[in-house]
């Protein structure tokens, strides 16, 4: 699915989202907080304020985690 649909679904379900090619099985948690989109590996928070590249924005392989 595209990033907009995945984000809406992740927020509604209280879950994260990812793409099959993300390194180290990382996943994202979209929020409306100052941390914006938080990057996780397993349950460990790695970073905040994820900055997508163009490929991430146009991809249609987003999945809910």
Image (cartoon, rainbow, N blue to C red):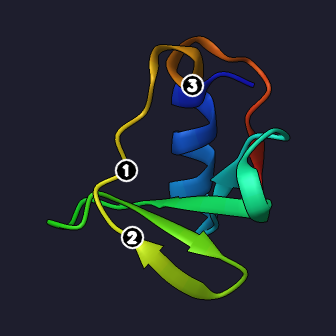
Q: Percent position (x, y) of residue 38?
A: 41, 65
The quarter of the image holding the N terminus is top right
> Depth check: 4 or 26 in front?
26
Say which mark, if any, is on residue 50.
1
Is residue 38 visible in the rendered structure shown here?
yes
Task: Check the image and report above or below for 32 versus 40.
Answer: above
Q: Are marks 1 and 2 in contact (CB under 8 Å)?
A: yes
Of the residues under marks 2 and 3, which one precedes in the sequence? 2
The quarter of the image holding the C terminus is bottom right
- 57 with respect to 63 (left or right): left
Give the residue displayed 57% in from the left and 25% down from the top: 56
Q: Percent position (x, y) of residue 39?
A: 50, 65
Task: Check the image and report above or below for 43 versus 27.
Answer: below
Instruction: Measure the alpha-carbon separation of dots 1 and 3.
Output: 11 Å
Give the residue displayed 85% in from the left and 41% down from the top: 20
Q: Residues within 10 Å of mark 3 (few under 14, many from 20)?
A: some
**Residue 44 sits in which quadrant?**
bottom right
Is residue 65 visible in the rendered structure shown here?
no
Q: Which residue is mark 3?
A: 56
Q: Percent position (x, y) of residue 45?
A: 49, 82
Give the residue displayed 27% in from the left and 57% down from the top: 36
Q: Which residue is mark 2?
A: 47
- 57 with respect to 5 (left or right): left
């Amino acid at each position: 699915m595209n990033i907009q649909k995945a984000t809406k679904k992740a927020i509604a379900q209280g879950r994260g989202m990812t793409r099959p090619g993300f390194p180290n099985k990382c996943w994202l948690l979209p929020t409306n907080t100052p941390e914006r989109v938080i990057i996780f590996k397993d349950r460990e928070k790695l970073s905040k304020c994820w900055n997508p590249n163009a490929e991430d924005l146009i991809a249609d392989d987003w999945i809910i985690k």
